[in-house]
Amino acid sequence: MEHGLSEGNGGFALVNSATRVVTGQWVAHVQKSLHERAFEAADLFNDTSLFVRPTIIQSAELWRVNRSYVGWALKRQKERELILAGTLPLVPPTVQALPASASTEQRLADIVAKRGVNATLAMLVAIERQTATV
């Protein structure tokens, strides 16, 4: 047994040897000097303190991943097995929004700019004739 952990059945089981529990939020916000923080870190290492409920930032730094990846992992727990198997990406691809629909006047102005006034009027006459015969 080393540092409060004992091996059992291929994993590790926590041994209750800590005399106090510190939360991730407390560690993130406590105002302590450099020397006090060093002793707090030593207490964690020596199992005098037990670190529980780390913040997302602390978890990301501990596991050496981007904070955004932790956020996506939290959101996509239901797809965990598919993501770990490589079937789905952790971060889904971004969906591009459709362009805003142009007003009727803007579309007509685009046609006039591309075809010219005479060609546009000829197209309008042809459309009018088609609708009149239907």
Image (cartoon, rainbow, N blue to C red):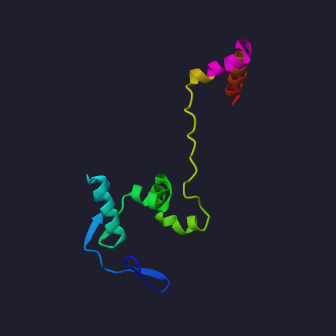
Q: Indicate the quadrant where residue 23 lies.
A: bottom left
> Is 22 left or right of 45, judged from the image as shown?
left
Q: In which quadrant will I find the C terminus?
A: top right
Image quarter in which the N terminus is found: bottom left
Across and down, in percent, residue 59 comes to 42, 60
Query: Residue 95's spot in the image, x, y percent?
Result: 57, 46
Residue sitting at x 34%, y 66%: 42
The answer to which image quadrant residue 54 occupies is: bottom left
Q: Is residue 35 left or right of residue 56?
A: left
Residue located at (48% from left, 52% from top): 68
Magenta stretch, main secondary structure class: helix
Does residue 123 show up?
Answer: yes
Residue 98, quarter of the rendered image: top right
Residue nearest the observer in this picture, 49 or 82: 49
Q: Which residues, given as a range, are shown in magenta?
A: 108-119
Q: Which x, y percent locates residue 35?
A: 30, 56
Q: Locate residue 75, reporting x and y percent.
A: 45, 58
Q: Is residue 133 left or right of residue 33?
A: right
Q: Is residue 50 above or below residue 76?
A: below
Q: Is residue 21 magenta?
A: no
Q: Which residue is pictured at 56% across the width and 64% down the height?
A: 83
Quick check: 116 above or below 1? Answer: above
